[in-house]
Image (cartoon, rainbow, N blue to C red):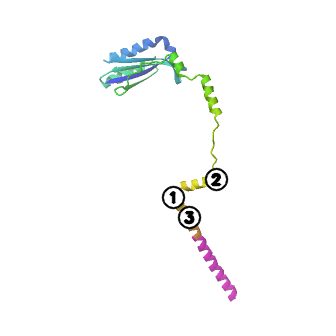
C-alpha cells in the first residue's frame, strides 16, 4: 500500500536537514518499505511558533509499505526522533502526484502585482462615479407587501379578527351592565 509522510524540521536544524531526511528514509527501509518519490520544500514560515521558532523545512516522501503493524512501529520510532518536530502519514493511493515545480524568485515576481499597478487600479475605480438608484418609499412598501409570507398575513388577520370580536363582546357586556344599572335606578 502506498503512503505519504510529510514531516517538519525546524530552522535551527538547517545544517542537518539532509541527515534527518536520510534517517527517516532509513527508518522506512528498515520496515521493508521502498521510497517512490520525494519533494523537499524550501524554508517556509510556520502558521504558529513551535519551540519559539517561526520557520521550518517540510519534506514529503511517498513510500510503499505492506503491513499495518509496520506503520505503527514507524510512527513510534518517528516520535523518538527529536529533529522531526511534526509529521503526518496518510494513504496516498488516491492522492495526486507530487508537484515537482517549485517557483523560483523570478517567476514569483512575475505573478505578483507591482505597487504602481495597484495605484493605477485604484485611480481607475475612483474616477468612475458610482450610480445609485433612487427608490421611492412607496415602492419599498409595495415590495415589502409582496415579500411577506402568506402565513404571517393569515395570523395577523386572525389576530385582528379576534381582537375585534373581543371588543364587541366587551361592548355588549358593558351595555348590558349599563341597562341593569339604569333599571335599578329607575325602579327605585
Secondary structure of residue under mark 1: helix
Occupied quadrant, residue 31: top left
- x and y percent of residue 35 in the render? 34, 17
Label the magenta part by its dominant secondary structure. helix
Secondary structure of residue under mark 2: helix
- x and y percent of residue 66 in the render? 29, 23
Q: Residue at x 35, y 22 (%)?
A: 73
- x and y percent of residue 152 in the render? 53, 58
Q: Is residue 31 left or right of residue 20?
A: left
Gap in angstroms between the C-alphas marked 2 and 3: 27 Å
Instruction: For the N terminus, give its image quadrant.
Output: top left
Q: Which residue is mark 2?
A: 137
Q: Residue at x 43, y 12 (%)?
A: 18
Around disc 2, counting alpha carbons within 10 Å, would you say few (fewer than 14), some (14 to 19), or many (20 or more)? few
Q: CB of mark 1 within 8 Å of CB of mark 2? A: no
Nearer the viewer's eye, disc 3 or disc 1?
A: 1
Nearer the viewer's eye, disc 2 or disc 3?
A: 2
Gap in angstroms between the C-alphas marked 1 and 2: 22 Å
Around disc 3, counting alpha carbons within 10 Å, would you say few (fewer than 14), some (14 to 19), or many (20 or more)? few
Which of the numbered marks, if any, corresponds to residue 150? 1
Q: Which residue is mark 3?
A: 159
Q: Which residues are magenta?
A: 165-188
Residue 185 appears in the figure: yes
Q: Is residue 161 left or right of residue 182?
A: left
Instruction: For the C terminus, give its image quadrant.
Output: bottom right
Occupied quadrant, residue 53: top right
* Residue 182 colored in magenta in the image: yes
Considering only order in the chain, which callout, 2 or 1, is on the residue closer to the N terminus?
Answer: 2
- x and y percent of residue 36 in the render? 34, 18
Nearer the viewer's eye, disc 1 or disc 2?
A: 2
Gap in angstroms between the C-alphas marked 3 and 1: 14 Å
Amino acid at each position: 500500500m502506498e503512503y505519504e509522510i510529510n514531516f517538519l524540521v525546524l530552522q535551527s536544524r538547517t545544517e542537518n536537514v539532509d541527515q534527518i531526511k536520510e534517517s527517516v528514509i532509513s527508518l522506512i527501509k528498515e520496515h521493508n518499505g521502498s521510497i517512490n518519490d520525494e519533494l523537499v520544500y524550501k524554508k517556509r514560515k510556520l502558521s504558529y511558533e513551535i519551540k519559539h521558532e517561526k520557520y521550518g523545512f517540510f519534506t514529503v516522501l511517498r513510500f510503499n509499505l505492506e503491513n499495518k503493524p509496520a506503520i505503527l512501529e514507524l510512527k513510534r520510532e518517528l516520535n523518538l526522533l527529536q529533529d522531526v518536530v511534526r509529521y503526518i502519514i496518510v494513504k496516498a493511493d488516491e492522492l495526486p502526484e507530487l508537484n515537482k515545480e517549485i517557483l523560483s524568485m523570478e517567476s514569483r515576481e512575475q505573478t505578483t502585482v507591482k505597487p504602481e499597478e495597484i495605484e493605477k487600479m485604484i485611480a481607475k475605480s475612483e474616477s468612475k462615479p458610482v450610480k445609485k438608484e433612487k427608490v421611492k418609499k412607496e415602492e419599498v412598501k409595495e415590495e415589502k407587501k409582496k415579500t411577506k409570507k402568506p402565513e404571517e398575513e393569515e395570523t395577523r388577520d386572525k389576530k385582528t379578527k379576534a381582537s375585534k370580536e373581543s371588543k364587541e363582546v366587551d361592548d355588549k357586556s358593558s351595555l348590558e351592565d349599563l341597562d341593569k344599572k339604569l333599571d335599578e335606578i329607575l325602579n327605585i
